[in-house]
Protein backbone atom coordinates (compact mmCIF):
# COMPACT_ATOMS: atom_id res chain seq x y z
CA UNK A 1 0.00 0.00 0.00
CA UNK A 2 1.45 3.36 -1.00
CA UNK A 3 2.15 6.02 1.61
CA UNK A 4 0.13 9.24 1.43
CA UNK A 5 2.37 11.83 -0.21
CA UNK A 6 2.34 15.34 -1.68
CA UNK A 7 2.08 15.36 -5.48
CA UNK A 8 2.64 18.22 -7.90
CA UNK A 9 0.76 18.00 -11.21
CA UNK A 10 1.67 20.61 -13.81
CA UNK A 11 -0.92 21.43 -16.44
CA UNK A 12 -3.16 20.47 -13.56
CA UNK A 13 -6.38 22.17 -14.68
CA UNK A 14 -6.44 20.72 -18.20
CA UNK A 15 -8.41 17.62 -19.17
CA UNK A 16 -5.55 15.21 -18.49
CA UNK A 17 -4.29 17.16 -15.50
CA UNK A 18 -7.66 17.21 -13.75
CA UNK A 19 -8.14 13.46 -14.19
CA UNK A 20 -4.64 12.84 -12.81
CA UNK A 21 -5.27 15.08 -9.80
CA UNK A 22 -8.53 13.29 -9.04
CA UNK A 23 -6.97 9.84 -9.32
CA UNK A 24 -4.02 10.68 -7.07
CA UNK A 25 -6.39 12.22 -4.53
CA UNK A 26 -8.55 9.10 -4.57
CA UNK A 27 -5.45 7.11 -3.63
CA UNK A 28 -4.92 9.29 -0.56
CA UNK A 29 -2.33 11.77 -1.82
CA UNK A 30 -2.46 15.53 -1.34
CA UNK A 31 -2.24 17.25 -4.70
CA UNK A 32 -1.07 20.63 -5.96
CA UNK A 33 -2.57 21.38 -9.37
CA UNK A 34 -0.16 23.89 -10.90
CA UNK A 35 -1.15 25.84 -13.99
CA UNK A 36 -1.48 29.34 -15.37
CA UNK A 37 -4.15 31.37 -13.56
CA UNK A 38 -5.17 33.32 -16.67
CA UNK A 39 -7.42 30.51 -17.95
CA UNK A 40 -10.57 31.52 -16.06
CA UNK A 41 -12.92 29.11 -17.88
CA UNK A 42 -10.63 26.11 -17.38
CA UNK A 43 -10.05 27.04 -13.75
CA UNK A 44 -13.80 27.25 -13.11
CA UNK A 45 -14.31 23.78 -14.64
CA UNK A 46 -11.44 22.43 -12.57
CA UNK A 47 -12.90 23.74 -9.29
CA UNK A 48 -16.31 22.30 -10.20
CA UNK A 49 -14.89 18.86 -10.99
CA UNK A 50 -12.70 18.73 -7.87
CA UNK A 51 -15.22 20.27 -5.46
CA UNK A 52 -15.78 17.00 -3.59
CA UNK A 53 -12.02 16.60 -3.05
CA UNK A 54 -11.21 20.24 -2.34
CA UNK A 55 -9.54 19.34 0.96
CA UNK A 56 -6.89 17.26 -0.80
CA UNK A 57 -6.55 19.08 -4.15
CA UNK A 58 -5.54 22.72 -4.35
CA UNK A 59 -4.77 24.97 -7.29
CA UNK A 60 -1.57 27.01 -7.33
CA UNK A 61 -0.50 29.37 -10.12
CA UNK A 62 2.82 28.54 -11.80
CA UNK A 63 4.55 29.47 -15.04
CA UNK A 64 6.67 26.41 -15.79
CA UNK A 65 8.72 28.33 -18.36
CA UNK A 66 10.17 30.63 -15.69
CA UNK A 67 13.17 28.90 -14.13
CA UNK A 68 13.66 31.29 -11.20
CA UNK A 69 9.95 31.46 -10.42
CA UNK A 70 9.76 27.66 -10.34
CA UNK A 71 12.58 27.57 -7.79
CA UNK A 72 10.90 30.21 -5.62
CA UNK A 73 7.45 28.65 -5.77
CA UNK A 74 8.54 25.07 -5.20
CA UNK A 75 10.65 26.11 -2.23
CA UNK A 76 7.74 28.06 -0.74
CA UNK A 77 5.26 25.25 -1.28
CA UNK A 78 7.50 22.68 0.36
CA UNK A 79 8.06 24.97 3.34
CA UNK A 80 4.29 25.36 3.67
CA UNK A 81 3.01 21.88 2.78
CA UNK A 82 5.92 19.49 3.17
CA UNK A 83 8.11 17.61 0.70
CA UNK A 84 6.93 17.08 -2.87
CA UNK A 85 7.57 13.38 -3.44
CA UNK A 86 5.62 13.01 -6.70
CA UNK A 87 5.97 15.13 -9.83
CA UNK A 88 3.63 14.59 -12.76
CA UNK A 89 4.63 16.92 -15.56
CA UNK A 90 1.59 17.22 -17.84
CA UNK A 91 1.96 20.85 -18.95
CA UNK A 92 2.10 21.17 -22.71
CA UNK A 93 1.00 23.27 -25.67
CA UNK A 94 0.88 22.99 -29.46
CA UNK A 95 1.60 25.61 -32.10
CA UNK A 96 1.10 23.54 -35.23
CA UNK A 97 2.55 24.74 -38.53
CA UNK A 98 4.61 23.15 -41.27
CA UNK A 99 8.29 23.92 -40.87
CA UNK A 100 8.41 26.27 -43.87
CA UNK A 101 5.69 28.39 -42.24
CA UNK A 102 6.75 27.99 -38.61
CA UNK A 103 7.90 31.12 -36.82
CA UNK A 104 10.77 31.20 -34.38
CA UNK A 105 8.25 32.24 -31.74
CA UNK A 106 6.11 29.13 -32.36
CA UNK A 107 9.19 26.93 -32.09
CA UNK A 108 10.43 28.53 -28.89
CA UNK A 109 7.04 28.63 -27.17
CA UNK A 110 6.49 24.89 -27.58
CA UNK A 111 10.02 23.96 -26.54
CA UNK A 112 9.78 26.25 -23.49
CA UNK A 113 6.52 24.79 -22.19
CA UNK A 114 6.91 21.17 -23.28
CA UNK A 115 10.62 20.54 -22.70
CA UNK A 116 12.54 23.34 -20.93
CA UNK A 117 10.02 23.17 -18.10
CA UNK A 118 11.09 19.61 -17.23
CA UNK A 119 14.56 20.94 -16.44
CA UNK A 120 13.16 23.85 -14.42
CA UNK A 121 11.06 21.53 -12.23
CA UNK A 122 13.43 18.61 -11.85
CA UNK A 123 16.47 20.79 -11.22
CA UNK A 124 14.87 22.00 -8.01
CA UNK A 125 12.98 18.90 -6.89
CA UNK A 126 15.41 16.07 -7.65
CA UNK A 127 18.18 17.06 -5.16
CA UNK A 128 15.59 17.15 -2.37
CA UNK A 129 14.16 13.79 -3.42
CA UNK A 130 17.69 12.36 -3.38
CA UNK A 131 18.21 13.59 0.17
CA UNK A 132 14.98 11.86 1.28
CA UNK A 133 15.65 8.68 -0.72
CA UNK A 134 12.31 8.66 -2.51
CA UNK A 135 10.69 10.20 -5.56
CA UNK A 136 8.30 9.47 -8.40
CA UNK A 137 8.57 11.54 -11.59
CA UNK A 138 6.24 11.00 -14.55
CA UNK A 139 6.50 13.03 -17.75
CA UNK A 140 3.58 13.14 -20.19
CA UNK A 141 5.11 12.72 -23.65
CA UNK A 142 3.11 11.83 -26.78
CA UNK A 143 2.71 9.18 -29.45
CA UNK A 144 3.69 11.94 -31.89
CA UNK A 145 7.07 12.14 -30.19
CA UNK A 146 7.53 8.53 -31.32
CA UNK A 147 6.06 8.70 -34.81
CA UNK A 148 6.34 12.36 -35.80
CA UNK A 149 3.32 14.22 -37.14
CA UNK A 150 2.74 16.55 -40.06
CA UNK A 151 2.91 20.17 -38.91
CA UNK A 152 4.41 19.30 -35.52
CA UNK A 153 8.18 19.49 -35.85
CA UNK A 154 8.25 21.64 -32.70
CA UNK A 155 5.87 19.47 -30.66
CA UNK A 156 7.33 16.13 -31.79
CA UNK A 157 10.87 17.34 -31.08
CA UNK A 158 9.87 18.50 -27.60
CA UNK A 159 8.04 15.28 -26.73
CA UNK A 160 10.82 13.06 -28.07
CA UNK A 161 13.34 15.16 -26.17
CA UNK A 162 11.28 14.79 -23.03
CA UNK A 163 11.76 11.03 -23.05
CA UNK A 164 15.49 11.41 -23.71
CA UNK A 165 15.55 13.63 -20.61
CA UNK A 166 13.56 10.96 -18.75
CA UNK A 167 15.99 8.15 -19.57
CA UNK A 168 19.07 10.14 -18.65
CA UNK A 169 17.60 11.39 -15.38
CA UNK A 170 16.41 7.87 -14.54
CA UNK A 171 20.01 6.67 -14.67
CA UNK A 172 21.15 9.49 -12.40
CA UNK A 173 18.39 8.85 -9.86
CA UNK A 174 18.10 5.07 -9.85
CA UNK A 175 20.20 4.45 -6.72
CA UNK A 176 18.46 7.17 -4.77
CA UNK A 177 14.97 5.64 -4.59
CA UNK A 178 13.65 7.84 -7.40
CA UNK A 179 11.97 6.52 -10.54
CA UNK A 180 11.60 8.63 -13.69
CA UNK A 181 9.24 7.47 -16.43
CA UNK A 182 7.31 8.82 -19.41
CA UNK A 183 3.81 8.11 -20.68
CA UNK A 184 3.06 8.50 -24.40
CA UNK A 185 -0.69 9.08 -24.82
CA UNK A 186 -2.32 8.62 -28.18
CA UNK A 187 -5.38 10.65 -29.12
CA UNK A 188 -7.32 11.41 -25.93
CA UNK A 189 -10.88 12.76 -25.76
CA UNK A 190 -10.23 16.27 -24.47
CA UNK A 191 -11.26 19.79 -25.48
CA UNK A 192 -8.32 19.89 -27.88
CA UNK A 193 -9.33 16.77 -29.81
CA UNK A 194 -13.03 17.68 -29.72
CA UNK A 195 -12.10 20.79 -31.68
CA UNK A 196 -10.84 18.63 -34.56
CA UNK A 197 -13.14 18.60 -37.57
CA UNK A 198 -15.62 15.72 -37.33
CA UNK A 199 -14.52 13.90 -40.51
CA UNK A 200 -10.90 14.03 -39.36
CA UNK A 201 -11.88 12.74 -35.90
CA UNK A 202 -13.65 9.82 -37.57
CA UNK A 203 -10.51 8.94 -39.55
CA UNK A 204 -8.43 9.13 -36.37
CA UNK A 205 -10.77 6.76 -34.53
CA UNK A 206 -10.74 4.38 -37.51
CA UNK A 207 -6.94 4.20 -37.24
CA UNK A 208 -7.02 3.13 -33.58
CA UNK A 209 -7.27 -0.67 -33.20
CA UNK A 210 -9.41 -0.56 -30.04
CA UNK A 211 -11.92 1.60 -31.92
CA UNK A 212 -12.09 4.69 -29.71
CA UNK A 213 -10.10 7.67 -28.51
CA UNK A 214 -8.55 7.38 -25.10
CA UNK A 215 -10.11 8.87 -21.99
CA UNK A 216 -8.22 11.11 -19.54
CA UNK A 217 -8.83 8.43 -16.92
CA UNK A 218 -6.79 5.96 -19.02
CA UNK A 219 -3.77 8.22 -18.55
CA UNK A 220 -4.57 8.92 -14.90
CA UNK A 221 -4.61 5.21 -14.03
CA UNK A 222 -1.22 4.74 -15.68
CA UNK A 223 0.19 7.71 -13.78
CA UNK A 224 -1.11 6.27 -10.51
CA UNK A 225 0.53 2.92 -11.25
CA UNK A 226 3.92 4.51 -11.91
CA UNK A 227 3.66 6.72 -8.81
CA UNK A 228 3.00 3.86 -6.40
CA UNK A 229 5.60 3.06 -3.77
CA UNK A 230 5.61 -0.49 -5.15
CA UNK A 231 6.59 0.64 -8.69
CA UNK A 232 10.22 0.97 -7.64
CA UNK A 233 11.64 -1.38 -10.29
CA UNK A 234 10.24 0.54 -13.27
CA UNK A 235 12.36 3.47 -14.35
CA UNK A 236 13.43 5.04 -17.64
CA UNK A 237 10.38 3.50 -19.33
CA UNK A 238 8.09 4.97 -21.97
CA UNK A 239 4.59 3.58 -21.43
CA UNK A 240 2.39 3.80 -24.55
CA UNK A 241 -1.31 4.44 -23.84
CA UNK A 242 -2.62 4.75 -27.37
CA UNK A 243 -5.16 1.99 -28.02
CA UNK A 244 -2.70 0.18 -30.28
CA UNK A 245 -2.30 3.11 -32.66
CA UNK A 246 1.49 2.73 -32.57
CA UNK A 247 3.23 -0.50 -31.59
CA UNK A 248 6.95 -1.18 -31.33
CA UNK A 249 9.51 -3.19 -29.39
Image (cartoon, grey):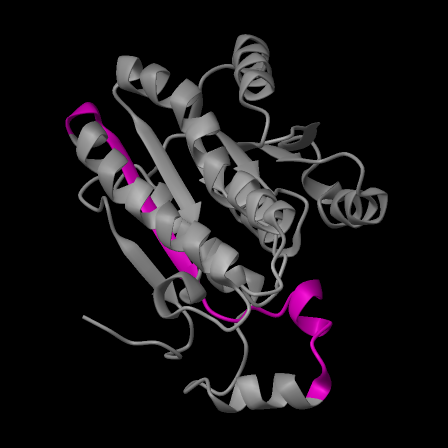
- Based on the displayed image, in which of its 4 quarters is residue 179 positioned? top left
- The question of residue 186 being in magenta is answered with yes
Look at the picture and state if 230 lies above or below 220: above
Residue 229 visible in the current orientation: yes
> Which quarter of the image is occupied by the N terminus?
top left
| Magenta segment includes 143 | no
Q: Quadrant of residue 79?
A: top right
Give the residue at the far left of this rendering. 175
Q: Nearer the viewer, residue 246 or 43?
A: 246
Q: Residue furthest front?
A: 100
Whether 55 is drawn above or below 46: the answer is above
- Range of the magenta residues? 175-198
- Give x and y (percent) for residue 241: 40, 66
Q: Position of residue 49 (x, y in %)?
A: 74, 50
Q: Does 63 sit left or right of 5 as displayed? A: right
The image quadrant where one finds the C terminus is: bottom left
Q: Residue 132 vs residue 97: left or right?
A: left
Q: Measuring 78% from the left and 48% from the top, which residue is drawn there?
A: 42
The answer to whether residue 5 is visible is no
Observer-nearest residue: 140 or 168?
Answer: 168
Residue at horizontal 53 percent and vertical 82 percent from the top: 212
Task: State the residue in front, 52 or 237.
Answer: 237
The extreme top residue here reads: 79
Q: Residue at x 63, y 57 (%)?
A: 95
Amino acid sequence: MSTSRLALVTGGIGGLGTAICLRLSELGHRVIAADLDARADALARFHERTRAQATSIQFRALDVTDHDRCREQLTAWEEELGPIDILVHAAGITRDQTLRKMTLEAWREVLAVDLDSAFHLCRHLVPRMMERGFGRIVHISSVNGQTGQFGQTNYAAAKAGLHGFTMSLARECARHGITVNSIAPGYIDTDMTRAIREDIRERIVASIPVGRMGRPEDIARTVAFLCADEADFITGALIPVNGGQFMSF
